[in-house]
Image (tube, rainbow, N blue to C red):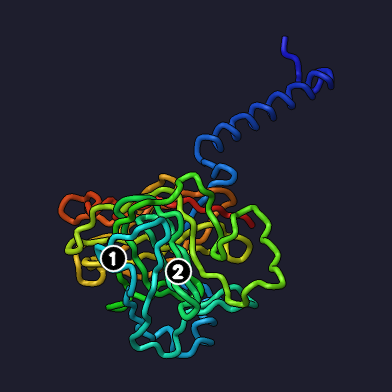
Amino acid sequence: MRISIRFLPLSILSAAILVCAACQSTNQNANTTATTSATPPGAQQLTQVSRPQTIEQMMKDRGEQDQAKPTLRIVSPANNATINGSTVEVKLELGGDLKGYMPHKDPATGKGNHIHVILDNEPYEAYYELNQGPFELRNVSEGWHTLRVFPSRPWHESYKNDGAFQMVEFTVKGGGDASKPTTTNSGDKMANPAKPESATASPTPSREGKDYSASQGGNIDRTKPLLTYSRPKGEYKGADADPIMIDFWLLNAKLQGDGGEYRVRYSVDGGQPTSLDKWEPIWLTGWINGKHRITLELIDPKTGNVVDNGGYNSTTREITISR
């Protein structure tokens, strides 16, 4: 006996339709899951971009300064000098074809041309006012140390001409206390309020400098390739947080894109390394908030390994992004 579907109760017919629709939806979802992959929320994808327009405008406003070829001479400490005490005075002499280049911090913006001063393989400190006295390396630990310096622009891009980079090595006897806190360039302890000036205080500005925790210089061979990490460094906020520049100084080596054989390699947060074939800064966009670790390395073309020179050719810095 045949029963026509038109005689089925309406409730049974509706249930059958819903079951079929559910099956079709399930099959579609299964197919979608198998053929697509979503990017995890908050994943960081960095992309190299051109020099930011704000910096391009700054370069135009500075006239010929970016074509300058500033040179430095380290007056003190002398190479292989022995310093008694934990404070080392760094005296520099600026020369070369300056085209108006002069280190100085603009009080209104807090920026300006400056010298990058690097003790051992610590992050650099900015030295702005060369004519107001030496830069003080304070609380330097006893032992062997390396000092590297080179001129920089307000946005921390280094000058890369011959004579810009200088380096000396020295020994400290009677070094400082490694437990002392870091201070600001004006000598005030971080997180402590600045002391008010007394009525009898000297009008002479305090010397620029830095209070260091314990560090030691590496055993550098001056004839071998040497990579000096410069940027990025510290905390990036607001508009300064994207894009971010990677910059470095290179001695006794040419990269492949500049007619040499070496490569510089960088990685972020332990990710896939990326090679740089030209000695020039790059800008990366796509950073997410939080702490990040940047590693910069100089690679031996014959072995594919880091070039050994005092431990300085592989450097990792931690930065913080907050927007």
Q: Is residue 213 above or below residue 124?
A: above
User: Residue 73: image x %, image y %?
Assistant: 32, 77
Amino acid residing under circle 1:
Val
Label 2: state its secondary structure. Answer: strand
Q: Nearer the viewer, residue 217 or 77?
A: 77
Sort mark 2 into few (<14), some (14-19) or many (20+) by Cα contacts within 10 Å. many
Spatial CA span between label 1 and label 2: 15 Å
Quarter placement of the N terminus: top right
Q: Locate residue 151, reporting x and y percent.
A: 40, 75
- At mark 1, the secondary structure is strand
Q: Position of residue 88 (x, y in %)?
A: 40, 63
**For the point 27% across and 78% down, which residue is it?**
162
Which residue is under mark 2?
135
Residue 60 seen in the current view: yes
Vertical relation: 63 (above or below) 15: below
Name which quarter of the figure residue 198 lies in.
bottom right
Q: State the residue lying farthest toward the right.
A: 10
Closest to the observer: 259 or 94? 94
